[in-house]
Image (cartoon, rainbow, N blue to C red):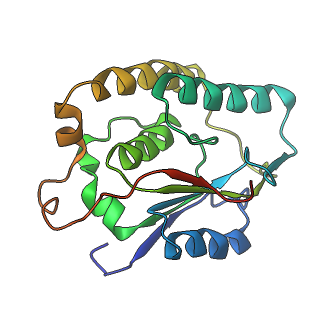
Amino acid sequence: MKKGYRFIFEMDADFSHNPKDLERLYAACVAGAGVAVGSRYVKGGAVENWPSNRILLSKGASLYTRLITWMPVKDPTAGFVCYKKEVLETINLDGIGFVGYAFQIEMKFAAWKLGFKITEVPITFIDREFGTSKMNKGIIKEGVLGVLQLRWQSMFKNYRKKLTNTDISASVNFQQSNVAIDGK
């Protein structure tokens, strides 16, 4: 952000996320989204080469997150994301506490709670050919308990203050709302 980039992308470096999809995430942000999520679970999205237990865990985590937080994002654990600079400047990144996959949920939740528009863009996620997953019981526990913690904390007025980067909050307009799902 210090270099003046207007859009910041996050993706898996093992090519589970297709670099060609970066353009579609970028286009969604240019069209008005504050956050564009490469989504496996919207119409047109897919997963390839994942064992059924990982698909079940991932879809279950997504459903659990939506039910607890009411965040209208179908793939809240996705790690293929484009952020507008204003979103990351507005979020108090020091206030983001999760480190496992729950980090993905917390960043989207923070952006949503601060009023930014989130658009989901269908992608095909292809499991890595080399290396191993970092998934473990600790990460699952953080996700289950962390989502409950997010919901609990968000019920109080000071939660939005905790999320907001006070250095720039006065200069950023974050009155956008809604979540758009591309490819309905």
Q: Position of residue 75 (x, y in %)?
A: 63, 42
Q: Quadrant of the N terminus?
A: bottom left
Q: Quadrant of residue 49?
A: top right
Above or below, 159 relative to 3 = above
Q: Position of residue 141 (x, y in %)?
A: 51, 18
Q: Position of residue 109 (x, y in %)?
A: 42, 41
Q: Nearer the viewer, residue 60 or 14?
A: 60
| Badge count | 0
Residue farthest to the bottom, as pictured: 4
Q: Residue at the spot x=64%, y=27% of the render?
A: 63
Q: Position of residue 124 (x, y in %)?
A: 79, 56
Above or below, 33 relative to 113 = below
Q: Residue at the spot x=69%, y=32% of the render?
A: 58
Is residue 157 found left or right of 67 in the rendered image? left
Above or below, 34 relative to 26 = above
Q: Residue at the spot x=69%, y=71% of the render?
A: 19
Q: Nearer the viewer, residue 122 or 138?
A: 122
Is residue 67 found left or right of 53 in the rendered image? left
Q: Quadrant of residue 140?
A: top right
Q: Nearer the viewer, residue 67 or 105?
A: 67
Is residue 25 found left or right of 156 in the rendered image? right
Above or below, 138 relative to 112 = above
Q: Nearer the viewer, residue 106 or 132?
A: 106
